[in-house]
Image (spheres, rainbow, N blue to C red):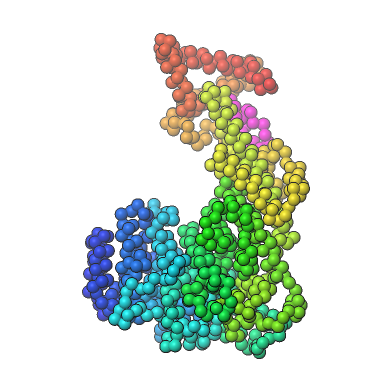
């Protein structure tokens, strides 16, 4: 798939393929280490694509590879694999050995993420250095385009793609927890190539020329190319990315760090739907229009070209136009939970990497930036320029497409990790103390530059949370987590300040100092937000919002009237779910009391049909207590965030309580009458989701034909059914005559022969159900109770009790039948009086 073209047959490759199917894993790895050490790059070049695919799997999913996602630390092969794939191990040594010879390996464009593939198919080169000067143009047309990557980029591309490539795993296998080999390798590579302390270790391999050559030097004047913030035109980028003898050698020490991050971001985050692609396929054009409009309200320091003539050079058409193939982007990408967890690991490490910037570099003047090391410059821009846009689109896609279940917790924690960079500063602080201390003021700039991450995604979370069951402890925990994060002191004020800057009227800009908002196409540099050309918060926030949502976006304020109404609705739902959790707890206590030892003797009141639908099966006991605690604290945090006082909260609770009563859980959900029956309203759906009301769901057929329960013996159920059916068929007429008598014998017969469930049920039914009930109301003999394990155990105890008093089996049986008959007489005579009391 990605093998070099037109190469001579390799006997080494043939031997390795044979050994891979015949020799043990440990021996194969040992021989691979020896091959990497002994053979020259010319031979290793031929086996490299096969080796990478045999480790990580092929891009089409046919080759499974070593299944790193299923390899646990307790496995015998775990340490062997980790040593072989370590950043200083044999595999990376092979990469550096080939890198020194400047070999190239091809990746078909068809295996790129959907938006990237679509962009190239349309004839537009994506604005990412990973794709610059690497497209291979075959004579057969664009459908067979490929990228020519250097060994390091190729290795990282296959490694990153193995996370999202669909594979046919054997039945019974599933991706396990976060201690698998793949997750640990991602963490290891991030810590090695993006170190929080020190610099990137040099290559352990050196050829005759003394070092491994980077793919293409970058001149000191060329800023880091970012994502969503576009640098120079394609022609200028083409020139600037060519090797230059005047390039600063020190700037090349982080080329591996840049390449690794670019591959991870493009492969893991560059996935979204067709609608989102159409919205963002040309965001820089919209941003350029905004720049032009804003610059016209200030006094420019240099001439600006109108958007119609010069702004399109940032998205210049590179290839002849080729229309998108049908259905190219119709498939909706759905990330897995493990995919999201790996993205969270990336986000957390990038925050730690960025926060490890030296204090003197953070506070230094712009003139001092030129003296900073390339790694320090990289730390300063890595989050905003490399990750922000792709991660925002990725999270927005997950918020809109993820199932409404507890697995959303992975997406939620990824979002919360990104919007809390102060958690990864490396300072050892007590979480409780840090919660009370609040967000430091220095993070206000980060909040402004990521305003949509806080406001727009919070609105997306609100849209989800009102549609889930908050009685479920896992869902209640997610609400609690979000409320706790946004309730941190100073954070809501920072968000409000950012919204005020965005909503500031444009006529105010006329009264500002003379400044220009330069775009990269106008010669500006996005290397640092502290440069003099980007000093105004209004420009910063507006460029952020318009760059991600487009200039025609309709921004909804997080603290505006509309969203405040949605929050009040959420507070009501939380309060209702809290009441439902209390009812579940009370109901569980009643069930526990009824299932005491006395219930074995028929003193309890088991209800086989009634189930309380307020939550999941495990939401009892301690889970219900946790649910109540999470919801209670969530209410407090939401009142703190949106400044709701006790009076407003009490009024909401009073409004909620006035529409409910003690028997609310027995009422039908809110419905309207339709042509085909009752139709649920939105209020009714919310009542069902949160367990406030429900439909009575019970078995209304023949009691003898109910499914066999777990507490019944299947053989005895079938045997007693045959016996009772024969008796009922032969003596059914006599039973009906007996039960129709109005005297004492008729009452006694109805007690033993009529179905107690049918006789005690006086609720209204539909016509069809009523006819079925009349048919089931006929007297019959039912022996199914004798097939219950509880009944069998009780009979065993009675027979053992009879043995202690020297009663034989026949005598014990007669005594049991006599006792049952006397019990029936007692119930017949005094049953009505006992029920009335």
153 or 278, which is in the foreground? 153
Residue drawn 54% across the image and 15% down it: 821
> Which residue ends up furthest to the front in the rendered image?
360
Where 538 falls versus 489 (above or below)?
below
Percent of width and height locating residue 577: 65, 45
Where 375 falls versus 699 (above or below)?
below
Percent of width and height locating residue 299: 71, 85
Residue drawn 24% across the image and 74% down it: 39
- Say if the magenta span includes residue 417: no
Q: In this view, does 493 lie to the left or right of 272?
A: right
246 or 634, which is in the foreground? 246
Percent of width and height locating residue 362: 56, 71
Where does the magenta region start and end?
A: 753-774
> Which residue ends up furthest to the top in the rendered image?
806
Q: Is residue 569 left or right of residue 626?
A: right
Would residue 81 be visible to someone looking at this image? Answer: yes
Percent of width and height locating residue 454: 63, 63
- Say if the magenta span includes residue 759: yes
Q: Main secondary structure of the magenta part?
A: helix
Q: Which quarter of the figure has residue 531?
A: bottom right
Residue drawn 66% across the image and 52% down it: 637
Quarter containing the N terminus: bottom left
Where 224 falls versus 798 (above or below)?
below
508 or 294, which is in the foreground? 508
Residue drawn 55% across the image and 52% down it: 430
Numbered label tally: 0
């Amino acid at each position: 798939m990605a093998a070099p073209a037109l190469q001579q047959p390799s006997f080494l490759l043939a031997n390795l393929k044979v050994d891979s199917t015949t020799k043990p894993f440990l021996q194969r790895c040992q021989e691979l280490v020896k091959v990497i050490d002994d053979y020259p790059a010319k031979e290793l070049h031929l086996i490299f694509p096969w080796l990478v695919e045999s480790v990580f799997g092929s891009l089409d999913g046919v080759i499974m590879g070593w299944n790193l996602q299923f390899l646990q630390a307790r496995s015998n092969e775990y340490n062997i694999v980790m040593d072989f794939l370590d950043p200083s191990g044999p595999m990376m040594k092979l990469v550096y050995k080939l890198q020194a010879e400047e070999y190239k390996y091809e990746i078909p464009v068809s295996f790129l993420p959907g938006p990237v593939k679509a962009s190239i198919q349309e004839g537009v080169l994506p604005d990412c250095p990973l794709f610059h000067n690497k497209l291979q143009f075959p004579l057969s047309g664009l459908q067979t385009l490929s990228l020519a990557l250097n060994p390091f980029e190729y290795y990282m591309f296959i490694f990153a793609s193995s996370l999202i490539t669909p594979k046919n795993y054997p039945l019974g296998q599933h991706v396990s927890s976060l201690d698998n080999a793949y997750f640990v390798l991602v963490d290891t590579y991030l810590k090695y190539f993006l170190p929080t302390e020190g610099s990137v270790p040099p290559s352990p391999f050196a050829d005759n020329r003394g070092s491994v050559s980077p793919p293409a030097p970058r001149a000191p004047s060329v800023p880091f190319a970012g994502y969503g913030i576009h640098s120079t035109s394609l022609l200028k980028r083409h020139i600037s990315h060519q090797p230059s003898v005047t390039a600063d050698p020190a700037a090349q020490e982080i080329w591996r760090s840049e390449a690794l991050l670019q591959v991870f971001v493009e492969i893991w985050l560059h996935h979204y739907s067709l609608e989102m692609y159409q919205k963002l396929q040309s965001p820089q054009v919209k941003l350029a229009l905004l720049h032009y409009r804003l610059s016209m309200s200030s006094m420019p320091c240099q001439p600006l070209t109108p958007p119609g003539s010069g702004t399109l050079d940032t998205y210049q058409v590179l290839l002849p136009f080729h229309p998108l193939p049908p259905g190219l982007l119709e498939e909706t990408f759905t990330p897995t939970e493990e995919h999201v967890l790996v993205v969270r690991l990336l986000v957390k490490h990038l925050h730690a990497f960025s926060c490890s910037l030296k204090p003197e570099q953070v506070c230094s003047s712009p003139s001092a930036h030129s003296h900073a090391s390339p790694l320090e410059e990289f730390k300063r821009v890595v989050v905003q320029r490399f990750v922000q846009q792709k991660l925002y689109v990725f999270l927005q896609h997950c918020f809109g497409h993820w199932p409404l279940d507890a697995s959303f917790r992975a997406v939620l924690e990824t979002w919360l990790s990104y919007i809390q960079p102060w958690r990864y500063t490396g300072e050892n602080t007590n979480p409780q103390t840090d919660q009370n201390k609040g967000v430091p003021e220095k993070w206000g700039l980060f909040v402004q530059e990521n305003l949509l991450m806080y406001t727009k995604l919070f609105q997306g979370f609100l849209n989800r949370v009102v549609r889930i069951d908050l009685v479920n402890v896992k869902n209640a925990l997610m609400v609690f987590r979000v409320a706790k994060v946004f309730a941190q002191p100073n954070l809501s004020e920072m968000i409000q300040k950012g919204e005020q800057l965005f909503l500031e009227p444009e006529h105010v800009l006329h009264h500002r100092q003379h400044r220009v908002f330069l775009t990269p196409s106008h010669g500006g540099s996005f290397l640092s937000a502290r440069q003099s050309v980007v000093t105004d918060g209004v420009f910063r926030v507006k460029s952020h919002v318009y760059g991600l949502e487009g200039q025609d976006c309709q921004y909804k304020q997080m603290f505006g009237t509309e969203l405040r109404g949605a929050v009040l609705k959420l507070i009501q739902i939380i309060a209702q779910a809290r009441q439902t959790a209390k009812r579940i707890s009370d109901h569980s206590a009643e069930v526990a009391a009824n299932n005491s030892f006395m219930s074995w003797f028929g003193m309890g009141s088991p209800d086989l049909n009634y189930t309380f639908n307020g939550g999941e099966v495990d939401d009892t006991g301690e889970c219900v207590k946790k649910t109540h605690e999470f919801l209670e604290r969530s209410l407090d945090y939401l009142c703190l965030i949106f400044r709701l006082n006790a009076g407003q909260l009490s009024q909401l609770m009073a409004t909620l309580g006035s529409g409910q009563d003690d028997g609310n859980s027995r009422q039908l959900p809110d419905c309207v009458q339709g042509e085909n029956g009752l139709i649920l309203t939105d209020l009714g759906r919310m009542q069902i989701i949160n367990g406030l009301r429900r439909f009575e769901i019970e078995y209304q057929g023949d009691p003898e034909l109910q499914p066999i329960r777990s507490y019944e013996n299947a053989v005895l159920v079938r045997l007693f059914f045959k016996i009772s059916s024969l008796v009922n068929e032969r003596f059914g007429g006599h039973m009906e005559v007996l039960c129709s008598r109005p005297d004492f014998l008729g009452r006694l017969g109805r007690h033993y022969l009529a179905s107690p469930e049918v006789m005690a049920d006086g609720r209204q039914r539909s016509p069809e159900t009523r006819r079925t009930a009349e048919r089931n109301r006929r007297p019959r003999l039912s022996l199914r109770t004798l097939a219950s394990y509880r009944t069998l155990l009780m009979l065993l105890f009675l027979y053992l009790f009879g043995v202690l008093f020297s009663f034989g089996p026949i005598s014990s049986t007669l005594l049991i039948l006599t006792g049952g008959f006397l019990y029936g007489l007692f119930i017949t005579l005094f049953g009505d009086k006992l029920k009335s009391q």
